[in-house]
Image (cartoon, grey):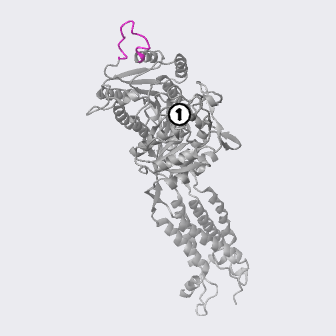
Amino acid sequence: MRRARLDVLRDWRFWLLAIAGLSLVVALVMPRLTLTRQARDLLLVIDVTGSMNVRDYIEGGEPVSRLATAKRAARALLAELPCQSRLGLAIFTERRSFLLFEPAEVCENFAAMDGAIDTIDWRMAWEGDSYVARGLHSALAIADSLPADLVFLTDGQEAPPLAGGELPAYEGEPGKVTGLLVGVGAAEPSPIPKYNEDGREIGFYAEQDVPQENRSGPPPADAPSRAGWNPRNAPWGGEPATGTEHLSAMREEALRRLAAQTGLGFAALRDPAALSAAVEADTRAHPVEVRVDISGIPAGLALLALTALFGLGALTGRRPERLPA
Amino acid sequence: MWRRMTADWGFDHPLLLALLLLAILPFIASAFVRRGIPTLGLAPADGVSRAVSLGLRLAGALAILAIVLGLAGLHRREQVIARQGTGAHLVLLLDRSSSMDNSFADRAPSGDQEAKSVVAKRLLDDFVARRARDRIGVAAFSTSPMPVLPLTDHHEVVRAAIAAIDRPGLAFTDVGRGLALALSSFAEDTDEASRAILLVSDGAALIDRRVQETLRDAVARTPVHLYWLFLRSRGAKGIFEAPPPGENTPQANPERHLHLFFQSLGVPYRAFEATSPQAVEQAIAEIDRQETRPITYVERVPRRDLARLAFAVAAAALALLLLAKLAERSLVRPASATAAAGREPVLRRAA
């Protein structure tokens, strides 16, 4: 009897079976592992001003607007955020950011948040102006009060243009709110679609439809050299300003300056699916505990052992061993 | 049938199911040592042996099947059970104009006075917390209407949207287009439930005649219950008392005329004029009491993971194989043990 048992112990098949059985027992009794994941609290602000209607992204061969691309990127980001992350949503137009909802947990409320991002529309804009720098400053104030990290998607088109190209002063403390300024749009200028009051598209903005120069505040230093300049009657020169403000490109240089002023990171949005990587790099993560089932690892080992057992059995041929003497 | 199965059951990693093919292996190979015997006559075919042989092969296949199913993450999906209860499909239409940031005395809030938006926020939050079974959507309006949240069962995000209403508001009050937006929130809502819009505002503005007609159309298509919680500031004109003749124009009394317009819509409508935080509280309690018609609401049964169960089945099948393996005996016996061995059905593999 003892001899027979030893025979079994010398057989590799027995050992493979034993490994498989043991692995399964381990899989059954293994407690769920508590892992820490990197969750984030984000405030997502989407620019809904008119220049976001510029169609300078190509998707499946069709031109799509900056706003549609920004929304797609935002939805992809929402889907990528690990559970227990929190996301709030705001829109920017005129000179402020307008909070739609405060950050809430993303997994439980996914459908509602996804729907909320999807319904964002340029028609929600209450004013045609686009003071991006001020909008960003107000978004930073909101993010600071929540608190959350900021992800601000904009094309950086200031309308009217900044007076003398100077950024308005930032009153907050740069770097207090971490986050990311995302530049939406292509580097080449494109015409901006124009809509009538019923929201129908009626062509594009022409040069004289938009302010080409900011004429509030003191005139620039070079004004006396302009044609028709008169210190009292025509302090900005006698001719209407010309320029390319009716065409819109993503103002990368201006956005980088703005990011530097406020201590945010900057990323240009080329691929909507890549936003979450940029957000991960520039926002703070806080560890949250999630319980993960890792019983698959020993169970996989069991499967491997069984496959090896039966596979080797099949490969070693069907010929019986030598006949007993 | 298949659709029903896939609706109820699912796999986290369906690609792993390709490994199910491995379950053929136990029918090709065996866990036992093959041995030659001089003649088939030594082990005549018998039913019990065949059954044991087949049983052990099946056990091997079952073990592999169960492990693969477990690895692929077999689970019963989250189930929704429809139940009858009381509640409503509700859209909160919130005024985000800057006048909401003033107190009821129409001043910047100071001391123990609260801004109207702060009062509305606190009370609406309580209201939502009490109405666990409602599907709630949120829309806001000020200078332009803004969809905030589609109808949802998840109230955490609704309360996050309510928490945002005491942020500084915008300039104007475009009630008409806000209401059109709130009505359109029900467009995809095909349920038979009672639908209600709760408008919270502290003022009104003229509604454009064209918008008025759009609203009448929309209300005819989507009958709703309309509640207007009018946060009346001190000195503002009331909506119930008719003003003296000569002043009764929509321009002078937009709130009163909005009230008349709502009454003319032909849907159940109630207005509450709240002049203090306590009055707001009473009005919300009243709405809470009114909106208690039957509603089919869904209760979630959370997803159930069956991986461990699958591993347990695999372990049981494997235990059977192990037992059989331990009972395996070599045909070659030491010379001292000449006694006739008991029949070992397991050894009939060679046959």
Q: Amino acid at mark 1?
A: Asn
Q: Secondary structure at mark 1?
A: loop
Q: Is residue A96 visible?
A: yes
The percent coordinates of residue A137 (x first, y second) are 45, 42
The percent coordinates of residue B172 (x first, y second) are 45, 25
Seen from the viewer's position, the closer of residues A220 and A199 is: A220
Residue at 51%, 61% in the rendered image:
B308
- The quarter in which the C terminus of chain B is drawn is bottom right
The percent coordinates of residue A2 (x first, y second) are 53, 87
In this rendering, is residue B125 above or below A294? above
The residue stretch that appears in magenta: B237-254
Seen from the viewer's position, the closer of residues B278 and A134 is: A134
Seen from the viewer's position, the closer of residues A227 and B109 is: A227
Indicate the chain on which mark 1 is placed: A
Residue at 48%, 17% in the rendered image:
B265
Which residue lies under the disc numbered 1? A214
